Image (tube, rainbow, N blue to C red):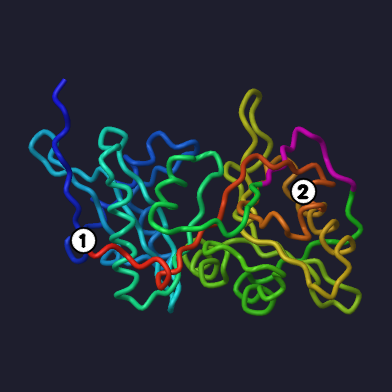
Amino acid sequence: MTAPKQPSMLTGAAVEIEALRQGFNRGFADYRYNMQMDPSGMLGHLHRSNIAPDDCAVLVAEEEGRLQGVGAALLAVRGDEGWCGGLSVDPAYRGGGWGRRLMEHLKRRAVERGVRRIFLEVLVSNDHARSVYRQVGFKRLRELLLWERDPRQGPLPLPYERLEETDPAQILRSFHRWHELPTIWQRRARSLLNYVEQHGCIGLTIPAKDGAPVAYVLVSAPSPYGAPAQGQPPARLRILDVAVDPEANLQDAARPLLQALQLRYVDARMTLMDQPADSRLNPVFASLGFRVFDRQYEMVVDLAENPPDTVQ
């Protein structure tokens, strides 16, 4: 079998979105979860997260006479903060230090853009990726929990409050500040507003006696909707964001919110990604039959303390 040719890295204006998508998909082909993106999915990811192709890097290699994307590193920028929206290298090209070189490029580009810190998330079980990130200066910031509730566990107790549909953009502008802990990049208000603009979503609130909301949840509609066919897995209901007014009683606000949500989508598997491990909402999730199905670390690099390598 012929060994693959040495790849090369394209950056700046040389980065084309299709090559970026190829490199992203091939690098994540053996990932635990499905990360494959079609062209519209990649464009959506770039828009939601404020990722400009000029800020990214793509690894390309000649295969059967054509250049193919075989790895990618994506950088999102907002003000003086950045986020790595994906680092991937095709398994056939791993072991040559390309992951580290891609990350060093992101650091150099971030400095050029005035970024002081770059954030990312990585599965706790992904020892290799965590090692690469540590080598380029990233430090563990906190643990994040991935929650799910399977409808086959049975229904929750009937809520004593009813959900009210509320404009998602209004929710985010008025109540995203309820988060008692900083949210990850993809759950920041800017990312969620971008998501609403692109795809729309469903905003639901629980009102207090005076009618003002005391808790909210944003969800993407499950697809396919309705009870699953025999032998088929339940439809997935993605909880995009959830928060409770810090002045409200947590149990009186969060429990009926989640109970009413489950009643509304009784046949759906509910998931919530990247909830901080020290969030006050976690005991409520656990008490209602949610389980932690995976864990991630949020990591950060301070570019003043860990400047990029000057050798490219």
Residue 138 magenta-highlighted: no
Give the number of the disc on residue 311. 1
Give the number of the disc on residue 193. none
In the image, residue 182 lies at what x, y percent?
Answer: 63, 68
In the image, residue 72 lies at what x, y percent?
Answer: 30, 51
The quarter of the picture where residue 211 lies is: bottom right
In the image, residue 35 lies at what x, y percent?
Answer: 43, 43
Residue at image x 72%, y 70%? 180
Is residue 97 shown left or right of residue 179?
A: left
- Three-letter amino acid code at the position of disc 1: Val
Of the numbered discs 2 and 1, the one sitting upstream in the chain is 2
Q: Nearer the viewer, residue 94 or 228?
A: 94
Region of the chain picked out in magenta, as a range: 147-157
Is 93 placed above or below 197 here? above
Residue at image x 40%, y 48%? 132
- Mark 2 Cα-neighbour bin, 10 Å: few <14, some 14–19, many ≥20: many
Residue at image x 87%, y 73%? 208
Is 62 placed above or below 144 here? above
In the image, residue 261 lies at what x, y percent?
Answer: 76, 53
- Three-letter amino acid code at the position of disc 2: Gln
Quadrant holding the C terminus? bottom left
| Cα distance in 3D space between marks 2 and 1 | 54 Å
Q: Nearer the viewer, residue 310 or 226?
A: 310
Quadrant holding the N terminus? top left
Residue furthest to the left: 65
Q: The residue tagged with tag 2: helix, strand or loop?
A: helix
Judging by the rendered image, the residue that carries numbered circle 2 is 262
Which label sits in the foreground, 2 or 1? 1
- Mark 1 Cα-neighbour bin, 10 Å: few <14, some 14–19, many ≥20: few
Q: The residue tagged with tag 1: helix, strand or loop?
A: loop
Residue furthest to the front: 305
Residue at image x 77%, y 67%? 244
